[in-house]
Image: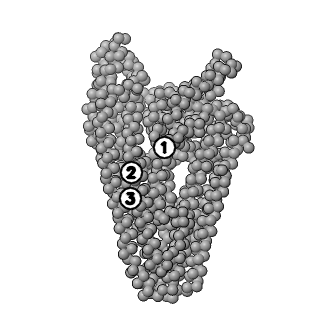
Amino acid sequence: MTTAASFINDLEKVAQARAQVAASLGRVAATLQAAELDGKSASGSLGLTREIADITAASKSLREGVFRLLVLGDMKRGKSTFLNALIGENILPSDVNPCTAILTVLRFGREKKVAVYFYNRKLPEYLDFQDFKRRYTIDPSEAKKLEQEKRQAFPDVSHAVVEYPLPLLEKGVEIVDSPGLNDTEARNELSLGYINNCHAILFVLRASQPCTLGERRYLENYIKGRGLTVFFLINAWDQIKESLIDPDDEEELREAEDKLRRVFKANLAEYCQLEGGDIYDERVFTISAIKALRKRLKNPLDALDGTGFPEFMRSLNIFLTQERGVAEIRQARTLARQIGDRIREAVELRIPLLDRDVMELKRCISSVEPEFQKLIDIGNQFQAEIRQTRDTKAKAVADSFRAYILNLGNTFESDFLQYQPELKLFDFFDGGKRENFNAALQKAFEQYVNDKLAEWSRTSAQYMDAAFLQLSRSAANYGASYSQVTDSINEKISGQKLPMGVSSSEGDRSPGWAKWAMGLFALSAGNLAGVALAGAGFDWKNILLNYFTVLGISGIIATISGIALGPIGIALLGLGIGVFQADQARREVVKVARQELVKHLPRIASEQWQVIYDAVKECFDSYEQQVTQRIDDDIAARKAELDNLLKQKESYEINRELEVKRLQTLQSTVGDEVHQIELAYDRLLEISG
C-alpha cells in the first residue's frame, strides 16, 4: 500500500472510531433522557441533567470534529502547489497574485463550490470556482496602488470556504490555506490569528531561500515557545541539482545538499523541541511539491518516491491518528466511564431506599445535611481560590504590560535596527518617491510593534499557564475531599459502602466537575481550542485574543506607527542630500522616532492597562463560572435524587419490583455502551501500534 493510501486508510479508521463512539455517546444521552422522563412516574428522576448535557456535547464534538491543518509561509514558497499535491488534485491556483489570497478553508463537500464570508453579519456569497477567481483577483499594479494607499483589496471579506469531494477531506481533514506572510501586516494578523484553532501548522519554506529574515521573524515571535505542533516543509529541494555547475556531479550535489541541511537545522532546531527532547527528524522534511503533484495527477495512488512526501506523510499520519486521534477517543472514553460510574452509583443508592418508608427516608435525608454543607463549603473554598488567583494574575499581567510598554523607549534604538534595511532612505529626498519611503517606514513600524506585542504575549501566556496549572492541582485536591464527603453521604443513606466504579478503580476518585477543571490546563496549553473532558469548550487564549481585538489592543499598532512619520520627515528635510549623510540620516530616523515614541508610551501604557486587566479577569471569571456551576449542579443533582424519591413515596406506592428492573436495565444499557466505547478505543490502539 502506498504512503498516501495508507494515510487515507488510517484516517478512515479514526473517522470510523469517532463515528462509533459518537453514536454510543448519543445513545447514552437518549437513554438517560428517557430514564429521567420515566422516573417522574416511578421512583423519581436521578438528577442527570448535567450528565445529559455533557455527553450530548461530547457526541456532537466527535461527529463534527476534524483535523485542522494551517499552511503558513512566505509568498512564492509553493504553498498552493504543495496543497494540490497533498490533496491529490490541482484545484488551488499556484500562480495567483498574493492579493487574491484571502484566507481559504478547504473542507469536504459533495459538490464543488465556494462560499465567501463577510464581516458585519453580511450573508455569505456562494460562487463557482471561475467566478471566485474572477471576483477576487487583482493585478499587480492595482495591488501596488492599494498598498501605497494603505487600503485592503477585500476589506469586508472574512474568509472563503472551498468545498470539494476529495478522499483526504472526506476522512476528517480540513486545510486552511493562508496568505503569504511577507504580505501586509493586516493579512499576517489574519493568518497568525488562526493558529490557536488548528491541530498542526505546515510551515512551507524554499530550498533556494533558506530561512529569510522575515521567516525567522515569524518563527521567533509567533511560533517559538507557544506549544504548537509545526511541520517544516523545505520545498523545491530538487532545484538544488539544477543550480549546480555540473548537475550530474553526485559528489557536488551531496555536498550542496549537506551544506543546506546544516543551514536549515541551525535555524529550525530550536523550534523542534518537545519536553526537552529533539524531534527535528520528525518535523522537518525536504520535498518537491511540483514533482509530487505531477505524479499524483498522472496516478492518484503513486507512491511519490523521491519527492519527500512519503516521509512527511508518515510523520503527519502518526501525529494525526496515533497522537491526536487516540487522544480524542481516550477523552471520550474517560467521559463515558465517568457517566457509567455516576449511573451505577445512583442506581445502587436508589434501590436500597425503595424499601424505606417516608419517615425513615426523611431521617436519612436530614442526617446528611451536614455533609451537603461540607460540599458547599468545598465549592466555596475553590471559588475563593480562583478569585484570588484572578485578582493577583490580572494585576500582574496588566502591570507587566505597562512596564513592557514603558521600557520600549529604552530599547528602541537597538531593537529597530533589524527593521531598517527595508527603508530606502534616499527615496525620501526624491519628492516622487517620498510616498514609497513613508510606506516602507510605516511597514517597518508595524512589524516592530507587532513583534514587540507578540514578545510580550508570550511572557503573559507563561503567567497564565502557571496560574491554570496551579488551579488544576487545586481542583484535584478539592475533588479528593469532595469525593470523601459524597462517599460518606452514600454510606449513611444506603447503610453500606458502595463499590468503586471503573474510573475509581484506576485511582481516580475525582468527581466530574474536578475532572473538567483539571482537564482545562492540559487542553488549553496546546494549540487547539479544545474541548474539556465534559465536552464544554474553554480556551483562555482565545478569550484573550477576542477581548484584545474588541477593546483595541491592535490599535496600538496604528497609534505607534502613525506618530513619528511627520517629525521624521521634517528632520530629514533639514539634512540635505549627500552620500556621506546616509548613516546620519539613518541615525536621525531612529533618534526622532524614539523621541516621538517616548512621548506617547505613558498614555498607551495607561489606557491599555485596564484593557489587559479586564481581559485576564474575563478568563478566570469564565473558568470560575464553569466550575462553580458544575459544582452547584452536582450538589443539586445529589439532593434531587433523594428529594424526588421522597416526593414520589409521599404521593403513591412505588412498585418495587418493576422499579428495580427499570433501574437495573438503565445501568446495564449504559454499561453496554461504555463497553462498546472501550472496544472502539482498544481497536484504535491496535491500529496505531
Q: Residues within 10 Å of mark 2 (few under 14, many from 20)?
A: some
Q: Is 599 positioned to the left or the right of 286 in the image?
A: left
Give residue 227's mark.
1
Q: CA distance from mark 3 to mark 1?
A: 25 Å
Q: Callout 1: 10 Å neighbours few (<14), some, many (20+)?
A: some
SS type, badge 3: helix
Rendered location of residue 170, percent (x, y): 64, 49
Residue topped by disc 2: 467
**Residue type marked 1:** Gly
In the rendered image, the vertical position of residue 522 relative to residue 272, given as above or below: below
Identify residue type, mark 2. Ala
Please report the residue visible at 56 percent of the width from the left and 77 percent of the height from the top: 663
| Relative vertical location of residue 18 with respect to residue 279 in this rendering, above or below | below
Quadrant housing residue 160: top right
Mark 3 sits on what residue?
624
Is 104 displayed left or right of 188 in the figure?
right
Question: How many C-alpha atoms fall within 10 Å of the one at disc 3: few (<14), some, or many (≥20)?
Answer: many
Q: Nearer the viewer, mark 3 or mark 1?
A: 1
Please say whether residue 476 is visible from this viewpoint. yes
